[in-house]
Image (cartoon, helix red, strand yellow):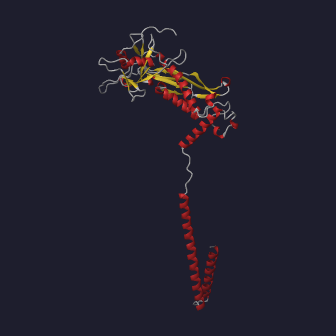
Amino acid sequence: MKELIEKRNDLITRAEDVLKVAKAEKRELTEDEAAELAEIRDNVRKIIETLKLDEDFREIEKEEMEVKEDDTPKEEEETVEERAMNKEIMEREAFENYIRGKVIHERAGELTPATQGSGIGLGGALIPETIVNYIIKKVYDICPILERSQKFNVKGRLEVPYYPADSQKINVAYQSEFSPLSSSSGSFATVELTGFLAGALTKISRSLINNVDFDIVGFVVDEMAYSIKRFIEHELLIGTSGKVTGLSTLTNGVNAASASAITLNEVIELHDAIKDEFQQNAIWIMSPKTRTALRELKSNTGYPLLNDDISTPFGTSILGKPVYVSDNMPDMAAGKDAIYYGDMRGLATKFNEEVNIEVLRERYADEHAIGVVGWFEFDSKVIDEQQIAKLTMAGTPTSE
């Protein structure tokens, strides 16, 4: 195309020169000059048409290329969900390899690429974030008392304000126009939550680890979750003197007439010890033996107090509210708090930090086992006695 453009320009220059000579001599074109200009004109037109066709074809070719590029499958960018899933797969694989001993070096620079940034580093020990999250989620799933309580994840001391049951609340009354309102305000109290360090240790047999067909990661998740759940649930229900008190300081409740049996009327009284505004999310908490005893209670018309109900969270209900059974709850015995009932949001739990879980692969080598330990710092206290009540058996508890 460059040669055609140069030829066109030369022809135009030649035509301009012929016309310039005729104008300078103030005459008409001769027959030879006219014939030459006509030929130049025809040749220039042909060149212009050729250049125009070339431009058109180039444009068509460009459009076709763009269409082909649009039709070519493009590598899509990784979505947030895909990145999270890939991270989970990599960390799960790295963690399994570490437990099984496929990764034997513990310095971050000597780990396989899959473990880089996974939390398995110097000291070898930290469980990757995704595995820890699985454990924490399972703890909440299997510990409804913790899951339903008011949770705070803050460091240091926390003061939670609340209105005591006997506090003077804000008054609302009829009033005449142009008469001042009498002001009043409730008296706030506070519950102070600190933090107590606790640890849960689970040992895993190396024979079990060496079984390649066994889901060792799932086993670790389950064992740690249940270990942590058992401890936390005990502290929320029973408490420990000088440490986490949980529901042990609760005073709102009903006293049973017997040290070894519960009546239908006492269960009803316990239910009605919670105001209707707190009934919606209320649950019953008791030991397996106490639940068995309540199965035998019937109304005057023979209607059982406790019903099997697959629509409730735990499969059984009393007066329409789900029954949660815990091995941490004491059985019916003198002076024991045998049943809790109410909305567990009246109980506050505070974690100073997320659960830190580590693998101790060498410490228990002489036992042909590895250890998995979970550390956490928490506290729990009742913050609203109007929402939770207890049934206490008669008599004085025997020393254990």
355 or 159: nearer the eye?
Answer: 355
Determine whether 43 is above or below 279 in the image. Answer: below
Rendered image quadrant of residue 36: bottom right
Quadrant where the N terminus lies? bottom right
Residue 184's x, y, as percent? 38, 21
98 or 121: nearer the eye?
Answer: 98
107 or 224: nearer the eye?
Answer: 224
Residue at 64%, 73% in the rendered image: 2
Q: Answer yes or no: is residue 65 visible.
A: yes
Tell me if 62 is positioned left or right of 386 in this view: right
Residue 73's x, y, as percent? 55, 55
Total labels drawn: 0
Residue at the extreme bottom: 31
Residue at 57%, 75% in the rendered image: 50
Tell me if 400 is positioned left or right of 279 in this view: right
Residue 237's x, y, as percent? 48, 19
Residue 328's x, y, as percent? 49, 19
184 or 30: nearer the eye?
Answer: 30
Rendered image quadrant of residue 306: top left
Tell me if 198 is positioned left or right of 144 in this view: right
Tell me if 19 is positioned left or right of 185 in this view: right
Q: Answer yes or no: is residue 166 visible.
A: no
